[in-house]
Amino acid sequence: MKRKILSLLLVMAMCLSLIACGGEEMGAVAEDVSSETADMDRSPVSNKPGDGSWAVYWYLCGSDLESNGGFATIDLAEMMEVELPENVNVVIQTGGSSAWQNEYMDPNKLQRWLYNSEGLQLLEEQDTANMGDAQTLYEFLAFANENYPADKVAVTFWNHGGGSVNGAAFDELHDLDSLDLAEMYEAFDAVWPADTENPALELVGFDTCLMATVDVAAVFQNFAKYLVGSEEVEPGNGWYYTGCEAVGTQDQTTLSLTDLTKLTPLLEAYESFGQEAFVAATEDPGFFAELGRAAAESENYGGNTREQGYTNMVDLGHLARQTAWMLPSAQNVCDALEECVLYKVNGMYRSESTGLSCYYSYNGDIDDFNGYIGVGAGMAFKHLFAYGLTGELAEGGEEYLNSLDIQELPEIVSLPDMGWDNKPLDINDNGATVLELGPDAYDALAGVDFLLYYVDEETDQMMLLGSDNDMNADWENGVFSDNFRGVWGAIDGHLVYMELSCPGEDYNLYSVPILLNDEEYNLQVAYDFNTEEWSILGAAKGLDESGMASKELRLLEEGDKITTIWKLASYSGDDDFEMYTVDDLTVTADTSFGEIDLYDGKYILMYEMWDAAGNYVYSDSADIDYLDGEMTTTI
């Protein structure tokens, strides 16, 4: 089986790689681009079924990745290093970018290109159109299918991705409009009518972020035998089109190959998993809190913090393993994933990746959830999340309840009703703060961490340094105490604001907002519990308001300027915290992240609590005086 998989990928070396972390210096796209499009014979080629011919239809939406960094041009140049046999054609549509970093692509046009054994040729060009529109995708697929059919066909997307809800192909020229899954289905179905028994295409691939999801797989099982995509954000250089080569962005990289002909058992197991969860939620008022804690400890992708934004994508297999103790059907999900995910790679700080992610509402955003209702696979999780977020059912919910013989929905435990806002703290014999909530915490809370603030009373300012989960948690009795040691994260000795983005058993991942050469980025940082070491994984931009995840996981380079950022508000007032630049530093070969002792002064620590619906409350605060390495805590 593995030999068959590798053969498939090697045949398509120009567009598929099983590790998304390569890149070279940008070269010229081509020196032999033909502009004689008027005289070109575009009549259908003579390829026949069974003749071994291949065609790749490449939907290349350049967006800001191209206009700002030339990444599409780089991948075009990489592809053109591959000498194709005579029976392979790559048909490319370019658009969606305000500028192309080469002399051939025109940002004012939609252009169609052919790359084959004779080189790169311009086929035709049209007035610009929205690459995030179903009609534009359909017209390209229809053109390619009519003029360049083949025995085996692959369709690949190149651009940003946004997961199950927001899709891919965000057009920079059209307000970052993107193709959602419904639009993709519409376009593909118009060219190749949906057929799960005999899909028309060999493969659909996403050289984008976050598109290896169970919902994406459910759409494309109607059209293709295989899906290649990444659960996590991809590096800006994307797939390496001439082979496999790691250049340092691999620690958070994921890529998987899913056999869509084997997907149906997974979809059935996923539906049973959701149905069992829904029944459990109607029987146990604390179920949503338990599910929330499991999701928080599961590997999730694209950030899912308030600074980075929320993709609401979590690894399906890891979530199933984390909930198997209360949902026996979770094991069927894991077994089905192993059968249909034929091959995958993942970096050391994406060790729990199982190849496909699923939707989970980390932030409780109703608009985002409504988007999921329209594209998500199956019914059970849609009704589960509707109930958990609103206390009510989605459309068709009454019939669904009847099908499960459930008479009524009990009222959900709501965190704002618990009376824990400004909950007083205690100090234990070790000088640590203690938050005592009682056994009700188990049924109400999806998570607890603590926030740390630095206070300057003379200037009436307080600065939020971030959040962490370094604490002792007795969930059965609802008692939490901090393990704060008087140290905090820093870049080359400069304290930073940092958010815990993904807690794990072997490592924690943190997001650190910075200015990198005066542009807003989030530094991705890992702490390894086994080695007790910190490492900088790269810098990424957060989600756009459109839901677009940045594809640029950028390594720091010597000479880069970093400006650290804290969050600032007045100490005596009630104004909101705003981003505040603090220190400038220059990246060197020895630049590193680590913990340093706090500066002398006054600090405040408080606990942050949240439930599965995205409601937050905060404890009362404790004062920490830090002087010459000694820490004194009072309340």
Image (tube, rainbow, N blue to C red):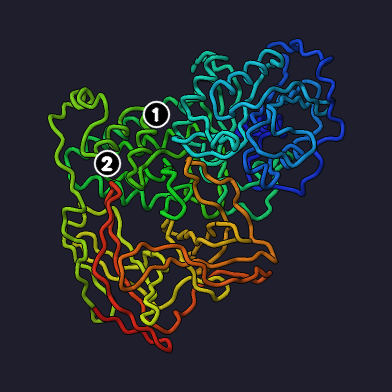
Q: Which residue is label 1 attached to? A: 377
Q: Quadrant of the N terminus?
A: top right
From the viewer's perspective, tell me whether residue 48 is left or right of residue 463.
right
270, 414: nearer the viewer: 414
Dot 1 or dot 2: first in sequence order is: 1
User: Is label 1 in a helix, a strand or a loop?
Assistant: loop
Residue at 45 percent of width and 64 percent of height: 498
From the image, state whether disc 1 or disc 2 is nearer to you: 2
205, 161: nearer the viewer: 161
Residue at 83 percent of width and 28 percent of height: 119
Q: Residue furthest right?
A: 32
Give the residue type at disc 1: Ala
Q: Is residue 529 visible?
A: no
Q: Quadrant of the C terminus?
A: bottom left
Residue 90 position, x and y percent, is: 72, 26
Q: Residue furthest left?
A: 407
User: Is label 2 in a helix, a strand or a loop?
Assistant: helix
**Disc number placed over residue 389 in the picture, else none:** 2
